[in-house]
Amino acid sequence: MSEYSPKAPWPASLEATILPGPKGTRRSGGLLGPIKRRGPLALSWPFYPATETLELTLLHPPGALVEGDQLSVRLNVKSGAKVVVVTPAAQKIYKAREVQSQTITLEVEAATLEWLPQETIVFAGARGVLSLTAEVAALGRFLGWEMVALKADLNEGQGSLSLATDISRAGRLVFRDRRNLFFPTAKRWLRSPLGWADQPVAGVLWALGREGQIEAALLATAAEKLQKASEAFDGFLGVTVRGELLLARCLGPSVEKTKAFLEKVWRTVRELWGEATYRPRIWST
């Protein structure tokens, strides 16, 4: 048997289907259907908060991406389900000579999926490639966020970070974002007001309502409320709406303040969607 090396790649994949739950019961939010998994990726036992929502925790016990790691997650949410997916802790991307990748694919039928992972922390010398693709049906709802925290010593070594996001509505692309940083040459961009404005944490939230004028109006109302309440944020932020898509971005001094802003956006959108507000239990542990 070969000696274990902490630098050895540890690929992992998970594919899961979320089925609608029995109506009129606490489990109406959904049921965990078939799962295919390989390596250190798993979903927690289903939890049903008082909101009749299925809450799942995505587990990656190593908690980090090291040399050559490749993570792949695919979730298919069937019509009628309402699901919140969280993670228990920050994901870390450490120094590596080879690319470390994480690929998230989310398929949402006439259902609701809220994707709320903890932050990703990027260390000096990392070569992270992170991508998220959300494919949402005409009557589906999707809300997700992403937080990236850069370590202070990031510019001390050669490294890179690539972030890609694609959100589609019934096969039509409604949002695409590409962000690429190469270290140490990115130092000027990180300090520039056109880049990260010397802030260590970047956050973005996407909320795609059901197709139609009613959902677009609800998100426009949410954006108006958030713009009025954003003056106290210690950083830079913006909230815009384009059709049924709300986009909130922020650059902040800490993960805590960035997450607090994204939580405010999440709660506001949830209320306008007619869903009761609550806080996932893993955030309190």
Image (tube, rainbow, N blue to C red):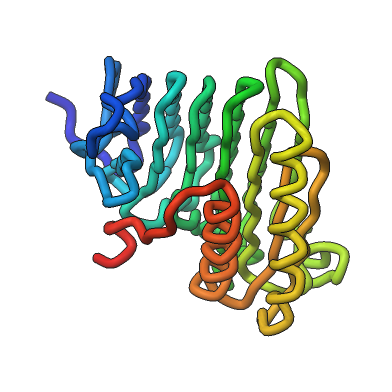
Query: Is residue 91 at all visible to an observer of this figure?
Result: yes
Compared with 51, 140 (above or below) is above
Compared with 266, 226 (above or below) is below
Percent across and percent down for residue 122 are 53, 57
Percent across and percent down for residue 236 are 75, 72
Q: Residue at x 44, y 39 (%)?
A: 67
Quadrant where the C terminus sits is bottom left
Answer with the quarter of the image where residue 71 lies.
top left
Instruction: Farthest residue to the left: give it.
Output: 1
Answer with the quarter of the image where residue 83 lies.
top left
Q: How many numbered callouts?
A: 0
Percent across and percent down for residue 66 are 41, 43
Going by the image, does 260 lie left or right of 34? Answer: right
Q: Residue at x 75, y 75 (%)?
A: 228
Going by the image, does 107 lie left or right of 12? Answer: right
Q: Residue at x 34, y 49 (%)?
A: 51
Nearer to us in this view, 66 or 175: 175
Nearer to us in this view, 136 or 30: 30
Compared with 110, 215 (above or below) is below
Answer with the quarter of the image where residue 166 lies.
top right
Instruction: Farthest residue to the front: give it.
Output: 24
Nearer to us in this view, 194 or 214: 214
Going by the image, does 145 lie left or right of 233? Answer: left
Nearer to us in this view, 217 or 115: 217
Q: Residue at x 59, y 38 (%)?
A: 129
Percent across and percent down for residue 185 are 78, 58
